[in-house]
Amino acid sequence: MAVIDIDEDAALDHDLVGPVVRSGTLAEAVIEAVEADNPGRDVLVLDRDDYIRIHTAKECRLTRASLERILGHPYQLAALEIDMPAFKGRLRTRTDEYVWSYEK
């Protein structure tokens, strides 16, 4: 679908999930990878200068393969946690993908 800039109020929607990543090259790559890994979903982005909230509705998937393709080098998803001070939703981690989900 599309990457859409949102405001603080929209970021509080209860069914949005995904990572909060420190601003920079990695955050931009995560946005692009989330867009690739979530076809048919809008990727909602809130840029707060020091960090960027990257969310989709109900489920947000990020694969190592997409992130490596965009970064142009190998990348272990566990390393993302250094630059991910927070996230929204329930996180399921695997070596090849992270999936945030909304659960009541």
Image (tube, grey):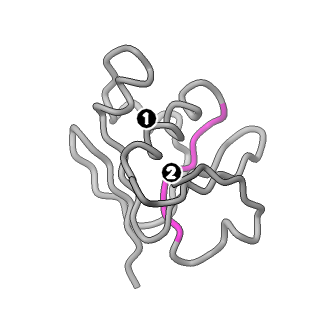
Q: Looking at the picture, which amino acid does disc 1 mark?
A: Leu
* 58 is higher (above) or lower (below) than 26: below
* 21 is higher (above) or lower (below) than 45: above
Query: As drawn, which residue projects farthest toward the left?
Result: 95
Q: Which sits in the foreground, 64 or 66? A: 66
**Residue at screen point 72% across, 59% down:** 6
Q: Report x, y in % for residue 93.
A: 27, 50
* 53 is higher (above) or lower (below) than 31: below
Q: Residues within 10 Å of mark 2 (few under 14, many from 20)?
A: many
Please state if 13 lies on the left or on the right of 78 as rendered: right
Identify the element where label 1 is drawn: helix
Identify the element where label 2 is drawn: strand
Q: Which residues are magenta?
A: 16-23
Q: Is residue 26 magenta?
A: no
Q: Which sits in the foreground, 90 or 15? A: 15
Report the residue marked by disc 1.
Answer: 80
Q: Report x, y in % for residue 92.
A: 28, 57
Q: CA distance from mark 2 to mark 1?
A: 10 Å
* 75 is higher (above) or lower (below) than 44: above
Please state if 76 lies on the left or on the right of 50 as rendered: left
**Residue at screen point 43% across, 35% down:** 80
**Residue at screen point 54% across, 52% down:** 86
Q: Looking at the picture, which amino acid does disc 2 mark?
A: Pro
The C terminus appears in which quarter of the rendering?
bottom left
Report the residue marked by disc 2.
Answer: 19
Q: Are marks 2 and 1 in contact (CB under 8 Å)?
A: yes
Q: Decide which of tag 2 and tag 1 comes sooner along the chain.
A: 2
Please state if 70 lies on the left or on the right of 64 as rendered: right
